[in-house]
Amino acid sequence: MMNTADLLNIFNRHRGDAIVIPGRGGRHWVNISDQPDLDVPLGDPAMGGHASFALGLALAQPQRRVVLFDSEGDIMMAMGVLATIAEQKPANLYHFMLDNECYATTGGQPVPNAKAVKYDTLAQGAGYPNAYAFDNLETFENQIEGILSRPGPVFVALKVNPEINNTPIGQRKRWLKRSALDSIAALRKSIGISAA
Amino acid sequence: MSENSSTHLSPETFVAEFKKHGVSHVVWLPDSETNFLYVLMKAEPSLTLVAVSREGLAFSTAAGLHAGGKVPVILIQNTGMMESGDSMRGWGLGLKIPVVMMIGYRGYTRHGVNTDTAATYTERFLNAFGINYYLVESDADADRISVAFEEAKRTQRPVAVLVGDEYHGFTSKP
């Protein structure tokens, strides 16, 4: 199992000018990234939707790399998105998935069949041309550059340490530095899209 | 165009409205109302079809397309819309996505004596979310589709078009 902040730091060295949707890694990414106007930290609009949001963004901006840090809980809720993404074949989409085997924000209850599901196999079965799985930082660090050089869609399953939170939701410290709407507005301005 | 276009709804009407409003992507899941529309949309070069596996994912996909500068439309059945509730809330309303939702109004009878509960709850569901909607039953109602597009853009909210009639084919005359 890897530490989420460590692997995000490794990724950041290879980020380039990619649009990054940090998803469940957002609480760390907002303190790691030095390109906040290309980041889209959304918090949690509704579970299960990050991958399809990333797909939409990738289809809309085919000339830019779009990188998502999804979670296994979200994929469990919307597994069919793997088929949709594979069918659309966005060559610019890099679909990382942080797998901590539990629902950390509700106290750490296990995801169904948490230790046995092979998400990289599911992605390949759905039609992703390239899929990987890592559970140690060294191997991830050695392969990340090659992964990002391949045409997408690429799926990367990452086993990470759970960061379980038992604090009542209303008492949690907010990690978002700006609202999801402000992040989207900043991204659109940054990539030259006029106001809607 | 169907011979009875004044009383029926033809898929050409929809495609014409999509083109008029610069729609780039149709995010959809087939329903009982849209088979013939599918064939026409697939042939239309200005449209990219994105097939989702569950209707809630249409809202998050549309949100991503909009964030990236494209103009999506959602095309789903009323049953799937109701399944989508939390996604509609978080991705559609929460992120202020100006998307038109074309909703197949399964079970609609015009007179309220429904035998299909999908129709019974459709408008109640939209009202609960505060989403405005317009009913189209024939080609004569096409201007309401434009009203929906303009309202979505102006209010930065999803707006629904309830499709109250099955398409009656689109056999084009030579």
Image: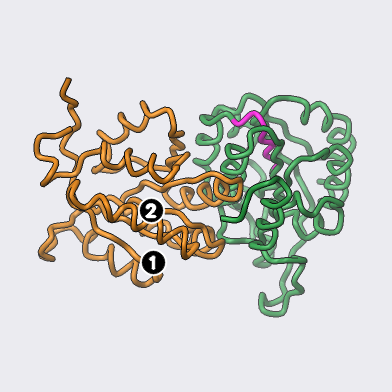
Chain colours: A green, B orange
Residue A118: x %, y % from top left: 64, 37
- Work out whether mark 1 precedes mark 2 in sequence or the reverse, and give the earlier one: 2
Packing grade of label 2 (10 A; few <14, some 14-19, many >=20) is many
Q: Residue at x 9, y 39 (%)?
A: B4
Q: Which residues are magenta?
A: A90-96
For disc 2, the marked residue is B101
Viewer-nearest residue: A155 or B49: B49
- SS at circle 1: loop
What amino acid type should be assigned to the residue bearing mark 1? Answer: Ile
Measure how far apart labels 1 and 2 are at the Cα level.
10 Å
Dot 2 amino acid type:
Met
The image quadrant of residue A132 is top right
Chain under numbered label 1: B
Identify the residue shown where x is 54% and y is 65%.
Answer: B94
**Residue A170 higher or lower than A33, as above or below:** below
**Position of residue B148 measured from the top left corner of the image (x, y, whole percent):** 36, 57
Q: Residue at left 62%, top 51%?
A: A194
Contact flag, marks 1 and 2 (Cβ < 8 Å): yes
Chain of the residue that carries numbered disc 2 in the rendered image: B
